[in-house]
Amino acid sequence: MNYATNWNYPTSISLGAGRIKEVVSECLELGIERPLIVTDPGIVTFSFVDKLKSNCSRQGLGIGIYSDVHPNPTGEDVDAGLEVYKKGNHDGVIALGGGSSLDAGKAIALMAGQTRPIWDFEDVGDNWQRVITSGVAPVIAIPTTAGTGSEVGRASVILDTNSLEKKIIFHPLMLPKKVILDPEVTIGLPAGLTAATGMDALSHSLEAFCAPGYHPMARGIAVEAIGLVKKWLPVAVNNGHNIEARTHMLVASTMGATAFQRGLGAMHAIAHSLGAVFGAHHGMLNAILMPYVLKANRTVIEDDIAWLSMAIGLEGNFDAFQKWVIDFRAELGIPHSLSEIGINATQIELIGTMSKIDPSAGTNPIIFDEKEYSKICLDAINGTL
């Protein structure tokens, strides 16, 4: 089946194999004459990056590249990328890669015309109103993983290396003007990263589904995305060249990030904290934490999870869904405990404190305190369910 199509929700999206070739026309449509590609040291070695650069150059675009983004992008990454952006007189960003590259690219585009430091735009109160809107550069986002959904987000998660906090930088204009979902650029992703990023997509939709508040559109998107992950993630992990599976996972990722307008929760609150302190992969953290957070939230979400379980073809109760999550992780090669990826309890109190104040904690179904967050994390370290 040919899935090539165009959407305009929540931004302009082009879906289909080979559509990365449309970058030049998209740049011209947006008035970008000197784009800066923002990516990471791994992605920059892929052949499609050279082809993208050559295609842009042949068409007269003044292409540049910044490829020093860390797996957990830092304020220093943004500063260095911004220096390259300004030295090259660039006028737009092509954010190419996983969530880290997309987040860094969006942050660089935001900072292109600002006079304040990036931390002045942390998603607290009305900080976003400080942004000089005329200085925000346009972004074309091309995800090479199916997980974060950052391509349709209005924020970036950036690590403050001074405070060791992951901070959310937000402004509505950070939403990319154009998204290209091309499954061909995800083919090179190893099975382990395909699994971890795919579970990240699942965590977005699952937490959005469980978040309190009334947003039936987001909830409906979350349910469909969970169904797509359930069906297609094992296929993508087992056969990374399956274009159909890669396409559906890119869509599920985009849907998950669209759905979490409803909110996230304790999975992300703890994952952000652990990522800042231990530098672990965000998707892997969410994948491991998932059943422990489900258990902690059970008293509030049990009826909703029973309905969701039935909606995705399982027996209609909480235990059936929890068992599916555990079995699904095992099938994908995801570890059962945080200790298996080298995380110990030495910073458990700090993680509890950081998790409680993380912005994602505010939309968890239960507002946990520091000790409760530490307990969830400790259970995940020990593998205790």
Image: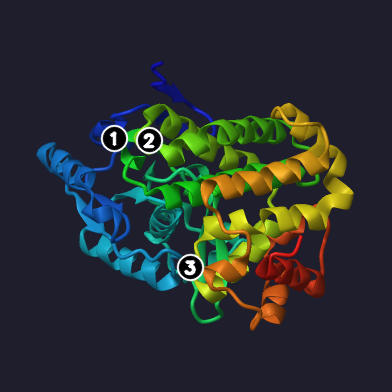
- Relative placement, left or right, of 253 versus 29 is right
Residue 56: horizontal and vertical position, in percent?
17, 41
Q: Are marks 1 and 2 in contact (CB under 8 Å)?
A: yes
- Relative placement, left or right, of 330 versus 48 is right
Quarter occupied by residue 376: bottom right
Label 2 CA crowd tier, 10 Å (few <14, some 14–19, many 20+):
many
Q: Are marks 3 and 1 in contact (CB under 8 Å)?
A: no
- Separation of disc 3 and disc 1 at Cα? 30 Å
- Relative placement, left or right, of 203 versus 116 is right
Residue 183: horizontal and vertical position, in percent?
37, 34
Q: Earlier in the sequence, mark 3 or mark 1?
A: 1
- Separation of disc 1 and disc 2 at Cα? 7 Å
Residue 317 in view in this figure: yes
For the residue marked with disc 1, what is the amino acid?
Ile
Disc 2 versus disc 3: nearer the observer: 2
Quarter occupied by residue 258: top right
Q: Are marks 2 and 3 in contact (CB under 8 Å)?
A: no
**Which residue is at a point 27% across and 36% down the rendered structure image?**
23
Residue 374: horizontal and vertical position, in percent?
74, 73
- Separation of disc 2 and disc 3 at Cα? 27 Å
**Which residue is at a point 20% across and 54% down the rendered structure image?**
64
Which residue is the site of mark 3?
Answer: 118
- Relative placement, left or right, of 257 versus 247 is right
Q: Nearer the viewer, residue 76 or 195?
A: 195
Q: Nearer the viewer, residue 4 or 194?
A: 194
Which residue is the site of mark 2?
Answer: 180
> What kind of element bears circle 3?
helix
Vertical relation: 166 (above or below) 48 = below
Q: Which mark is residue 116?
A: none
Quarter occupied by residue 366: bottom right
Q: Which mark is residue 20?
A: 1
